[in-house]
Image (cartoon, rainbow, N blue to C red):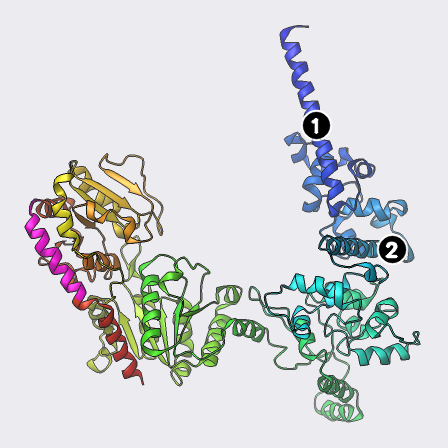
């Protein structure tokens, strides 16, 4: 044999060995997975048609994958057909009760292969189908029971008393963790799963019912009516497990098998307990189960199942049971028939023969379910102010929202922050521990706009704060636009505005453009972070003096503790220890912040090092592969002490549009020399006496000149940095900010 032949034989042997090992691994995986009902590859291969599978799904052949291996690992979850004539969807629906967590081929092999459970010509008798389904149903209960007993044994809990009971999955479906914790005096720290295990180990053997679906008086009456053995010392619930459930006797006055079938015609051929179907499937499938109450479910993320809430609310309420029974009696009464007959004379369409939905507020209203869920998220207590934010990431508006919340808490009492749009909560320390916060984004996510605004309005109406402050929440702006008049009847509305954004074509966009005019009539105050923006808004919307006074510039305070000595003095004193001048640049690598301008300036000043902190946030990241040698990049910083502030010669800020950036306020409070673009409100802080301003739109050469002037004049650098520090301390202090907010609150009363 030649060398090539030997190599080929070796490769073939390796491939065969890999295939054998893969099959062994798959067999171990099948044996452990409940999806395959304990069957191995060989058993499943008996009914799998590899040739058919390859013809039906040529992608497997193209990939060179063994057909059965592909089916067992992927195909069954993709509803692929294992052999000709097998209708997967029909089989899962009719034979597996919609169970998509079990492999259909495994189910067929385990329960139905002997009777050829196929669609079409191979159809079996109804009795065969029923018997096979019951075998499967009981096997699922047996599997669940073994898992529970094994888990309890592993936890060291006694299981002897449980092994004589007919356990099943319906116990978990009936279990109410809230009721159990309440009955046993357990706190919320005991989880739902732990509560259920406690119930199995201690409550069930004592005959305790798992939740409000079991109503003892109802079951005792129905047991007598159905001629079941008398209920002895074992108690009503254990009697139901042994006798009532196998005979499909509902233990709840809220549920009847006849009513369930009347509302769900597709279940008429269902071969097993209708009560069990409701508990195991109907509740989660949100099926109607009564003819006299229409229950609609919320669609918000995390909104509890309304059927479960209905059962929890009325399962043990005898007065409610009587009212519902009275409603049913009236619908079938002679008086009702007489009323309908009289109406029928005028309108033949009015008849008792038509099934009409019956409404029992609030269970018919899906938005109420979402509102109630959101309401349940609110903390206890009263709040003087509510601050509405879309999220908390790392932006300037998020930072201002934190300052606003903490200051309101200090000067006016409890504050509640409602997060409306997204779940990001990156900087909780900005808000502090004394401010309550609720994330509503999950509850709002699946609702349409009307549902979201309605829910937020109702929440605010429930909280009834003295003041509501919106800091960039789009949902809050839409809610004020829709319900501003109603909200203004019990609270004062305030909105924060920051600089407008710009589209790629240069047009202004954002809240100051789109969400000022539609809500301004309802606002007590429109707060801006700069006088420039207040003047722009007043001019743009031609506000007369009696309205313009609602526009209120409130300068953001510096919150970072400044060094004992101004930075500029430390920098100038240490300049001789640096081989080259060093400047800091920090910001987003987005169009607005002009990182490209920084690079042009760096190329023109090769003897100056530029240390840059930032990343792209709103726009695609720029090409960072060909940076000048004097530009060094760092990830965004989270605190100013992470920056080498004393080991540099100044700060370089670029932007094409802006408000009054908090980074300039914070660095100004420390005495940092700054070269900055004159965007938006920046000139209110950086002018010829406090720094080196450069007009927006000027070429990079003007920035180069400004930097060179700053670096060449250490004494001027000290003078201007100290003047900037004094301006920040006098105008951007925490006390000045608190005074400005206090004046707004006073005017609002």
Between 390 and 296, the one lying in front of the other is 390
Q: CA distance from mark 2 to mark 1?
A: 38 Å
SS assignment for the magenta stretch, majority? helix
Between 68 and 102, the one lying in front of the other is 102
Quarter of the figure with residue 164: bottom right
Q: Magenta includes 574?
A: no
* Circle 1 residues within 10 Å: few <14, some 14–19, many ≥20: few
In-image side of 487 versus 297 (left or right) = left
Disc number for residue 505: none
Label 2: element kind: helix
Q: Quadrant of the N terminus?
A: top right
Q: Is residue 496 visible?
A: yes
Q: Quadrant of the C terminus?
A: bottom left
| Residue 190 spot, x, y in % from top left | 62, 65
| Residue 543 spot, x, y in % from top left | 23, 77
Between 36 and 377, the one lying in front of the other is 377
Between 39 and 738, the one lying in front of the other is 738
Total label count?
Answer: 2
In-image side of 282 versus 608 (left or right) = right
Q: Residue furthest top?
A: 1
Q: Magenta includes 725?
A: yes
Question: Which residue range is magenta in the image?
Answer: 712-729
Residue shown at 77% from the left, 64% from the top: 170
| Residue 274 spot, x, y in % from top left | 81, 67
Disc number for residue 129: 2
- Seen in the picture, residue 568 relative to 353 is either above or below; the reply is above
Q: Which residue in the structure is indicated by mark 1? A: 19
Residue shown at 31% from the left, 56% from the top: 503
Q: Is residue 117 visible?
A: no
| Residue 552 spot, x, y in % from top left | 24, 74
């Amino acid at each position: 044999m030649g060398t090539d032949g030997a190599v080929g034989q070796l490769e073939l042997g390796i491939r065969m060995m890999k295939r054998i090992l893969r099959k062994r691994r798959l067999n171990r995986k099948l044996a452990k997975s409940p999806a395959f009902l304990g069957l191995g590859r060989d058993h499943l291969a008996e009914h799998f048609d590899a040739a058919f599978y390859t013809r039906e799904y040529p992608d497997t052949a193209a990939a060179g994958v063994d057909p059965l291996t592909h089916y067992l690992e992927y195909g069954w979850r993709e509803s692929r057909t294992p052999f000709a004539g097998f209708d997967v969807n029909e089989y899962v629906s009719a034979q597996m009760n919609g169970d998509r967590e079990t492999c259909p081929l495994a189910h067929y092999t385990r329960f139905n292969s002997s009777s050829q459970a196929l669609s079409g010509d191979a159809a079996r008798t109804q009795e065969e189908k029923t018997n096979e389904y019951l075998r499967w149903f009981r096997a699922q209960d047996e599997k669940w029971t073994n898992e529970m007993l094994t888990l309890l044994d592993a936890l060291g809990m006694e299981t002897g008393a449980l092994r004589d009971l007919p356990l099943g999955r319906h116990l978990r479906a009936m279990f109410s963790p809230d009721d159990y914790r309440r009955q046993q005096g357990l706190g919320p720290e005991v989880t739902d799963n732990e509560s259920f295990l406690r119930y199995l180990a201690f409550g069930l053997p004592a005959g305790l019912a798992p939740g409000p679906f079991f109503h003892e008086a109802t079951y005792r009456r129905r047991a007598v009516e159905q001629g079941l053995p008398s209920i002895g010392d074992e108690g009503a619930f254990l009697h139901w497990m042994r006798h009532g459930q196998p005979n499909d006797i509902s233990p709840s006055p809220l549920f009847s098998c006849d009513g369930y079938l009347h509302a769900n015609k597709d279940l008429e051929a269902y071969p097993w307990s209708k009560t069990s179907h409701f508990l195991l499937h109907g509740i989660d499938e949100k099926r109607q189960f009564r003819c006299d109450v229409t229950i609609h479910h919320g669609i918000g993320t995390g909104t509890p199942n309304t059927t479960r809430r209905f059962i929890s609310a009325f399962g043990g309420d005898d007065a409610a049971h009587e009212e519902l029974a009275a409603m049913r009696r009236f619908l079938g009464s002679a008086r009702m028939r007489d009323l309908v007959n009289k109406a029928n004379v005028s309108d033949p369409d009015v008849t008792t023969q038509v099934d009409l939905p019956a409404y029992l507020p609030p269970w018919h209203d899906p938005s109420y379910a979402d509102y109630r869920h959101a309401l349940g998220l609110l903390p206890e207590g009263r709040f003087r102010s509510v601050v509405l934010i879309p999220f908390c990431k790392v932006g300037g508006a998020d930072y201002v929202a934190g300052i606003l919340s903490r200051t309101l808490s200090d000067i006016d009492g409890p504050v509640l922050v409602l997060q409306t749009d997204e779940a990001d909560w990156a900087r909780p320390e900005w808000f502090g521990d004394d401010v309550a916060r609720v994330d509503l984004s999950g509850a709002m996510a699946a609702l349409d706009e009307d549902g979201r605004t309605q829910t937020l309005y109702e929440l605010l109406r429930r909280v009834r704060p003295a003041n509501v402050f919106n800091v960039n929440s789009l949902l809050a702006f839409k809610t004020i636009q829709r319900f501003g008049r109603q909200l203004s009847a019990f609270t004062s509305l305030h909105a924060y505005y920051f600089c407008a954004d710009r589209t790629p074509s240069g047009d202004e966009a954002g809240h100051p453009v789109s969400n000022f005019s539609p809500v301004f009539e309802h606002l007590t105050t429109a707060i801006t972070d700069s006088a420039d923006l207040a003047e722009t808004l007043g001019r743009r919307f031609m506000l007369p003096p009696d309205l313009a006074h609602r526009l209120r510039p409130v300068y953001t305070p510096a919150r970072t503790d400044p060094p004992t000595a101004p930075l500029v003095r430390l920098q100038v004193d240490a300049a001789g220890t640096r081989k080259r001048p060093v400047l800091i640049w920090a910001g987003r690598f987005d169009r607005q912040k002009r990182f490209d301008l920084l690079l042009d300036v760096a190329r023109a000043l090769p003897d100056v090092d530029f240390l840059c902190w930032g990343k792209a946030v709103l726009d695609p990241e720029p090409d960072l592969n060909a940076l000048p040698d004097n530009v060094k990049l760092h990830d965004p910083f989270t605190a100013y002490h992470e920056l080498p502030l004393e080991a540099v010669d100044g700060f370089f800020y670029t932007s094409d549009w802006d408000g009054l950036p908090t980074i300039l306020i914070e660095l100004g409070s420390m005495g940092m020399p700054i070269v900055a673009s004159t965007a938006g409100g920046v000139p209110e802080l950086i002018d010829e006496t406090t720094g080196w301003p450069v007009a927006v739109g000027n070429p990079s050469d003007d920035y180069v000149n400004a930097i060179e002037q700053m670096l060449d004049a250490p004494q001027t650098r000290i003078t201007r940095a100290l003047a900037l520090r004094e301006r920040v301390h006098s105008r951007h202090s925490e006390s000045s900010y608190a005074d400005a907010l206090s004046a707004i609150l006073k005017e609002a009363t």
